[in-house]
Image (spheres, grey):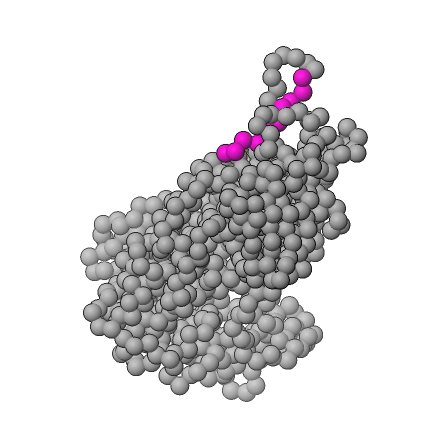
């Protein structure tokens, strides 16, 4: 199989080389006769291979022009590869933009499924330019994009689906529908991929449902296969819009069940408006209370969100939804009240059918293994290597490049580099004219530029995969790099989009990230860059109040679509972590601070805010899960017991007791704390206090001026199966 792949690569690269060396359109017969790899084939076999190669080249961004001159029925089609279809337009990045781009790659290395295509894209964009790097920015920003469901299987699925989307191939696979708890064979026309909250999804036409559906990749089991060997299985989707799947609130995934009216306290009214106003309408009363009106597609989902706001939110209507919230809080209270005698699970005694010894406190994520990344297409990697080698020659016939530089820049082993060089030595323009000859000598690659080799000394245009990886990374990091200049990534993105061309821009496949407004984000990055004290107003969720404090910001961290700043809090005289979206305002002061070596700046763990005083690491809670939610909880947390009735016992790590209390209340009594026992009373008391708001009839919404009049995103029938 490897030999067949090498033969195809030599054939396709030689086809590109031949077309570029000819300054006129050529016939199929000329291609058959002159291009390496087609010789010796019958006419039928040649045409089959040629059309397949042409289709794959177009999927990689290289479009051949086809022309049939005159009305001569015996004159066949003429083929050409215009320079504008091959070369990447030059981009003039300044030093700040280059530094920001390379810092993005550093931050995403090992934490981003598309790090390898991103690396190749940067090789194309910065050819011949030094790779500046902002070490300070790299030390003050950290990301973790690998959710608990990410694995080598998901990486393999991403690679296959990427190919299927580009080639418009129908795919087949076995899928676990978690809602129905069943496995079935599925046949799907894949339209797009989507990353949200640490998980990857595919959006496509389900043949079984004859409707567009969204599938979570971690629930695809076994291999993904193509339906047929045809060049294409389905036409390009017309007017496909990813936004209904990308720009949705968690409670708007299903069919519309009505409109919820939710009253929020002055403490968080600003936050709800900022973070969720786009999903409905928001008004603010004279007393500071806010009213949020939003459509919802599931009672449980909207109830989960409201309960997550604690005592700061109250459902005003409709009555059925208000009753559902009351019932959920009563169930939480009743199932967490501590009674005398041995504890019994909510559904009584049950048989344990599986018992797994706890593994202890989970450890932070580590660098991703090689088989857990989406491999860059070898065709584009070979083009990047060939361009790098030929550009080293300049105007001379020979050049030298250290093997260590090539291996580092392209992330290659010595064996992979040597294999690639051997293959490149076979690329030719026809008639015995080769592009280059390269060999390893004393730790260097010695390159001899052959006739027409200059054709490949300029970078090729970005493949769709490279373009997507690059724009995805730039949008994700956004304005959060503490680098000097006016948002260097934004200006770099504008230049990249112009070079790619509007008609070739890939869709943005990134879900909405919880962040602060622009003024807050700019203040934080400025304070981190200049080591200045930051004055903030912060919503402390556990206490339900906004506090003013001064902090020494050390590190920006992303985890599961939320950004945090790790800082030394001068009020508490301790290390604290603050979610950016809960910072109402931020102002950079004139005071400088000295960085503290004792701060723990390791990977942030998504188990609530940093430990309170006296806590140094995450603890673990044992939680019983009702069968109705057991499957979903098992995806997120390790299961230590499985019971005969379908319920499970899981371990949930936490660093903040307040976070754990709120997390369990959100599950509406279907997740019950087993250990530690002391917290059970706290959960029951918290639910009782929240119920007090619902003991009197709902007050009418406060009068005020609407702040947001945004229609909630339209929703296709798109439940995650």
Please give the name of the residue rendered at 44% of the width and 42% of the height, measured from the top-left corner.
90
Task: Determine the image quadrant of residue 270.
Answer: bottom left
Residue extending farthest bottom: 341
Q: What residue do we see at 60% from left, 50% from top?
A: 447
**314 sits to left or right of 341:** left
Q: Which residues are magenta?
A: 75-84
Q: How many marks?
A: 0
Please give the name of the residue rendered at 61% of the width and 19% of the height, measured from the top-left corner.
68
Front in this rendered view, residue 355 or 411: 411
Residue 453 figure quarter: top right
Taking the image as shown, residue 251 lies to the left or right of residue 222, namely: left
The location of residue 12, given as percent across then percent down, is 66, 39
Q: Judge left or right: residue 507 versus residue 520.
A: right
Looking at the image, residue 269 lies above or below residue 611: above
Q: Position of residue 583 (x, y in %)?
A: 30, 65
Q: Is residue 237 above or below residue 691?
A: above
Q: In the image, residue 304 lies at what x, y percent? A: 45, 62
Q: Is residue 81 magenta?
A: yes
Q: 307 or 406, which is in the foreground?
A: 406
Q: Is residue 122 visible?
A: yes
User: Does the magenta-highlighted stretch encompass residue 419?
Assistant: no
Relative to the observer, which residue lies in front, 136 or 502? 136
Q: Quadrant of residue 178?
A: bottom right
């Amino acid at each position: 199989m490897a030999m067949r792949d090498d033969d195809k690569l030599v054939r396709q690269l030689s086809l590109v080389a031949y077309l570029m060396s000819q300054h006129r359109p050529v016939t199929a017969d000329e291609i058959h006769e002159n291009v390496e790899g087609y010789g010796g084939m019958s006419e039928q076999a040649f045409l089959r291979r040629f059309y397949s190669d042409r289709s794959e080249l177009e999927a990689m961004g290289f479009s051949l022009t086809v022309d049939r001159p005159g009305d001569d029925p015996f004159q066949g089609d003429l083929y050409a590869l215009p320079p504008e279809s091959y070369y990447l337009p030059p981009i003039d990045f300044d030093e700040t933009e280059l530094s920001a781009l390379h810092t993005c790659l550093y931050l995403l290395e090992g934490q981003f499924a598309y790090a390898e295509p991103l690396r190749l894209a940067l090789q194309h964009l910065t050819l011949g330019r030094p790779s500046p790097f902002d070490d300070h920015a790299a030390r003050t920003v950290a990301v973790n994009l690998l959710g608990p469901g990410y694995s080598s299987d998901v990486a393999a699925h991403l690679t296959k689906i990427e190919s299927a989307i580009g080639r418009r191939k129908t795919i087949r696979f076995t899928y676990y529908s978690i809602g129905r708890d069943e496995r079935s064979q599925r046949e799907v026309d894949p339209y797009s991929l989507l990353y949200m909250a640490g998980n990857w999804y595919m959006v496509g036409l389900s043949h079984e449902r004859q409707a567009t559906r969204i599938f979570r990749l971690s629930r695809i089991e076994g291999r993904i296969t193509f339906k047929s060997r045809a060049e294409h299985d389905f036409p390009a989707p017309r007017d496909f819009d990813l936004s209904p799947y990308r720009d949705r609130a968690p409670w708007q995934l299903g069919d519309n069940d009505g409109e919820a009216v939710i009253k929020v306290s002055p403490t968080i009214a600003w936050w709800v408006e900022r973070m969720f106003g786009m999903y409905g309408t928001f008004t603010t009363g004279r007393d500071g209370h806010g009213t949020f009106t939003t459509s919802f597609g599931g009672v449980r989902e909207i109830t989960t969100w409201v309960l997550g706001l604690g005592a700061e939110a109250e459902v005003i209507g409709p009555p059925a939804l208000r009753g559902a919230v009351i019932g959920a809080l009563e169930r939480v209270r009743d199932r967490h009240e501590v009674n005398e005698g041995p504890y019994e699970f909510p559904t009584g005694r049950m048989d344990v059918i599986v018992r797994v010894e706890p593994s202890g406190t989970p450890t932070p994520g580590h660098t991703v293994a090689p088989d857990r990344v989406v491999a860059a297409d070898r065709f584009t990697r070979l083009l990047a290597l060939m361009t790098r080698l030929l550009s080293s020659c300049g105007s001379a016939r020979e050049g030298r490049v250290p093997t260590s530089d090539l291996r580092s820049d392209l992330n290659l082993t010595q064996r992979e580099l040597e294999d690639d060089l051997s293959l490149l030595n076979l690329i030719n323009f026809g008639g015995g004219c080769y592009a280059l000859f390269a060999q390893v000598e004393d730790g260097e690659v010695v390159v001899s530029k052959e006739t027409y080799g200059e054709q490949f000394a300029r970078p090729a245009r970005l493949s769709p995969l490279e373009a997507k990886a690059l724009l995805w990374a730039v949008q994700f990091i956004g304005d959060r790099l503490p680098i000097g200049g006016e948002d260097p990534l934004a200006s770099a993105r504008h230049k990249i989009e112009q070079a790619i061309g509007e008609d070739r821009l890939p869709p943005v496949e990134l879900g909405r990230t919880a962040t602060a407004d622009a003024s807050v984000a700019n203040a934080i990055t400025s304070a981190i860059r200049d080591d200045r004290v930051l004055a903030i107003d912060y919503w402390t969720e556990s206490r339900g109040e906004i506090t003013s404090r001064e902090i020494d910001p050390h590190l920006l961290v992303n985890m599961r679509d939320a950004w945090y700043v790790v800082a030394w809090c001068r009020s508490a005289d301790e290390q604290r972590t603050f979610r950016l979206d809960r910072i109402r305002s931020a102002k950079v002061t004139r005071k400088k601070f000295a960085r503290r070596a004792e701060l723990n700046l390791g990977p942030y763990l998504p188990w609530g805010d940093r430990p309170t005083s006296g806590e140094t690491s995450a603890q673990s809670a044992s939680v019983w899960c009702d069968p109705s939610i057991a499957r979903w909880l098992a995806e997120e947390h390790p299961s230590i017991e499985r019971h005969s009735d379908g319920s499970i016992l899981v371990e949930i790590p936490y660093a903040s007791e307040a976070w754990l209390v709120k997390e369990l209340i959100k599950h509406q009594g279907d997740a019950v704390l087993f250990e530690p026992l002391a917290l059970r009373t706290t959960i029951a008391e918290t639910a009782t206090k929240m119920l007090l708001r619902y003991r009197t009839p709902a007050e009418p919404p406060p009068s005020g001026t609407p702040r947001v009049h945004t229609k909630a995103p339209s929703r296709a029938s798109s439940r995650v199966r």
